[in-house]
Image (cartoon, grey):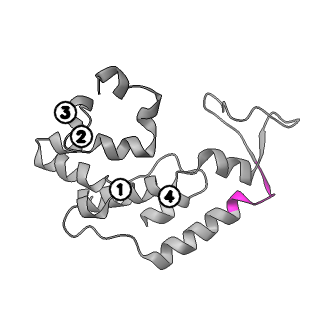
């Protein structure tokens, strides 16, 4: 496989991820987490992997009951017909341009959830990474729109 083939459109597919971490293919792709030399960065890279056999020692999955309840809440948000009115003080949304007569952004909760919620696999990786980092005291999570990611982190 040549480097140009590795950077093609297929490089983002799930099957490519398995090949990318393969010890025989990674020298050509240059993307393996196994090449991190710093012990701290290596542990962080292990925590972000999908396969449990790569996770650091003591890194356990989240509580299944709590995950199930949060995912039920996520499903209810994705099917909600409620609307919220908000004032965007930033650059604005590329996903949504509709405003009401006051100049405020009016969106359905389902639209907001569909465009802003982090996928479950990414949230679980973030939780594993934070358990590996073990922040002492408090930390601030920015960018919360509906609080689903924060619920997983709690």
Q: Which of marks 2 and 4 is in front?
A: 2
Contact between marks 3 and 1 (CB within 8 A): the answer is: no
Between the C-alphas of marks 3 and 2, the distance is: 8 Å
Q: Which of marks 4 and 1 is in front?
A: 1
10 Å crowding of disc 2: few (<14), some (14-19), many (20+): some
The answer to which of marks 4 and 1 sits earlier in the sequence is: 1
Can you see residue 18? yes
**Residue 62 as seen in the image, left or right of residue 113:** left
The image quadrant where one finds the C terminus is: bottom left
Q: Residue 27 carries which label?
A: 3
Contact between marks 2 and 4 (CB within 8 A): the answer is: no
10 Å crowding of disc 4: few (<14), some (14-19), many (20+): some
Q: Which mark is residue 50?
A: 1
Q: Does the magenta stretch include residue 71?
A: no
Q: What stretch is highlighted in magenta?
A: 77-84
Q: Nearer the viewer, mark 3 or mark 2?
A: 3
The answer to which of marks 4 and 3 sits earlier in the sequence is: 3
10 Å crowding of disc 3: few (<14), some (14-19), many (20+): few
Which residue in the structure is indicated by mark 2? 32
Between the C-alphas of marks 2 and 4, the distance is: 23 Å
Contact between marks 4 and 3 (CB within 8 A): the answer is: no
Q: Which residue lies furthest to the front in this view?
A: 1
Indicate the position of residue 48 as horizontal and vertical percent values.
Answer: 32, 52
- Which residue occupies the foreground of this view, 64 or 146? 64
Secondary structure of the residue carrying tag 4 is helix
**Residue 78 as seen in the image, left or right of residue 26:** right
The answer to which of marks 3 and 2 sits earlier in the sequence is: 3
Secondary structure of the residue carrying tag 2 is loop
Q: Residue 120 carries which label?
A: 4
């Amino acid at each position: 496989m040549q480097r140009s083939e590795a950077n093609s459109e297929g490089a983002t597919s799930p099957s490519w991820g398995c090949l990318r971490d393969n010890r025989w293919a990674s020298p050509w792709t240059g993307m393996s987490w196994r090449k991190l030399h710093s012990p701290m960065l290596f542990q962080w890279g292990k925590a972000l992997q999908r396969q449990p056999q790569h996770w650091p020692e003591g890194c356990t999955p989240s509580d299944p009951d709590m995950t199930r309840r949060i995912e039920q809440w996520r499903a209810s948000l994705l099917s909600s017909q409620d609307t919220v009115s908000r004032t965007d003080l930033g650059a604005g949304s590329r996903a949504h341009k509709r405003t009401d007569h006051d100049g405020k952004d009016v969106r359905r909760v389902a639209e907001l959830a569909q465009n802003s919620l982090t996928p479950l696999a990414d949230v679980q990786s973030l939780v594993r990474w934070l358990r590996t980092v073990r922040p002492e005291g408090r930390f601030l999570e920015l960018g919360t729109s509906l609080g689903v990611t924060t619920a997983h982190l709690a």
